[in-house]
């Protein structure tokens, strides 16, 4: 479904990604593991059109999307939920959510349907829909961020570090929802530092270090790989 071939990205003279190749097939939940600065966010920013590739190809269902405008990429079915949530804290939960449907603003019936689907997935957000997003707990803010991304009607959802800064119990709740989103039919590419929790819900995984893919395989295989456990799980 989504395929990256020899993708390279530069920030000035710094090469952030070096010939990265990976794929996420339709219906898969694929996790991208790596430390801070490894290149996970650079992949997501480039796929979503916020960075321009220096080389290589990005294809969605065989169609080249590398370098397209972000709005066109969203319309094609690729939606990015960024690291750090990036909410508008003084705006209500409802307004933050509806901003995610900006490319479908003329389809108000569809927007209301998407909103109802988000509330079914995150019932607490229905209760807090008129509250300022910045007044919510960290876990609830992450729900708003994921919900906002779902308002873009993704065929493939790019989730960048959704567990960052959350308590262990909340991490489990958030990743359980990610698994449910995938089971409901959305392909998910998930970037995570919490390797153990992420590998438990993923089908396959890639490990990125220094802007390069250094390992890939079935999630269960990597979960029991000694090098992965030492580097990312601590056991």
Image (cartoon, rainbow, N blue to C red):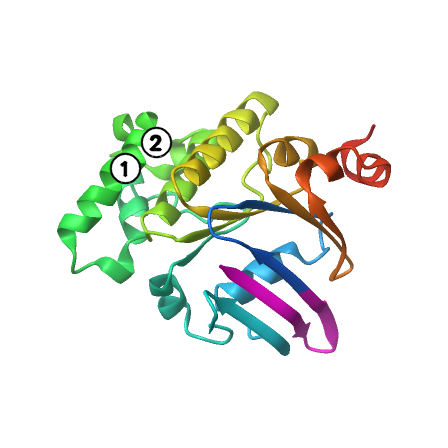
215 vs 94, nearest the viewer: 215
Residue position marked by numbered label 2 in the rendering: 121
Residue 94's label in the rendered image is: none
In the rendered view, tell whether residue 218 sits above or below residue 224. below
Q: Position of residue 108 (x, y in %)?
A: 15, 52
Quadrant position of residue 208: bottom right
SS of the residue under disc 2: helix
For the residues labelled 1 and 2, say whether their Cβ atoms are less than 8 Å apart.
yes
Relative to 141, 191 lies left or right? right
SS of the residue under disc 1: helix
In the rendered view, tell whether residue 191 sits above or below residue 47. above
Give the residues drawn in magenta, as a range. Answer: 1-20
Count the marks: how many? 2
133 vs 230, nearest the viewer: 230
Residue position marked by numbered label 1 in the rendering: 117
Marks 1 and 2, how far apart in space?
6 Å
């Amino acid at each position: 479904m989504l395929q990256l071939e020899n993708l390279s990205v530069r920030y000035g003279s710094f090469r952030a990604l070096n010939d990265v190749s990976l794929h996420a097939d339709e219906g898969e939940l694929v996790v991208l593991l790596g430390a801070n600065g490894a290149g996970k966010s650079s992949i997501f920013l480039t796929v979503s059109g916020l960075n321009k590739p220096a080389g290589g190809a990005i294809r969605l269902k065989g169609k080249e999307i590398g370098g397209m405008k972000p709005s066109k990429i969203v319309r094609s079915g690729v939606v990015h939920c960024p690291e750090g949530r990036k909410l508008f804290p003084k705006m209500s939960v409802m307004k933050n959510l509806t901003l995610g449907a900006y490319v479908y603003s003329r389809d108000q019936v569809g927007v209301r349907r998407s909103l109802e689907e988000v509330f079914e997935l995150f019932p607490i957000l229905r209760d807090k829909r008129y509250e300022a997003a910045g007044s919510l707990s960290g876990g609830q803010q992450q729900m708003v961020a994921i919900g906002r991304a779902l308002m873009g009607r993704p065929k493939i959802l790019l989730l960048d570090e959704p567990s960052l800064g959350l308590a262990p119990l909340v991490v489990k709740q958030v990743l359980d929802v990610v698994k449910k989103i995938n089971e409901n039919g959305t392909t998910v590419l998930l970037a995570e530092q919490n390797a153990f929790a992420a590998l438990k819900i993923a089908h396959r995984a890639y490990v990125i270090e220094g802007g390069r893919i250094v390992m890939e395989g079935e999630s269960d295989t990597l979960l029991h790989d000694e090098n992965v456990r030492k580097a990312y799980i601590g056991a």
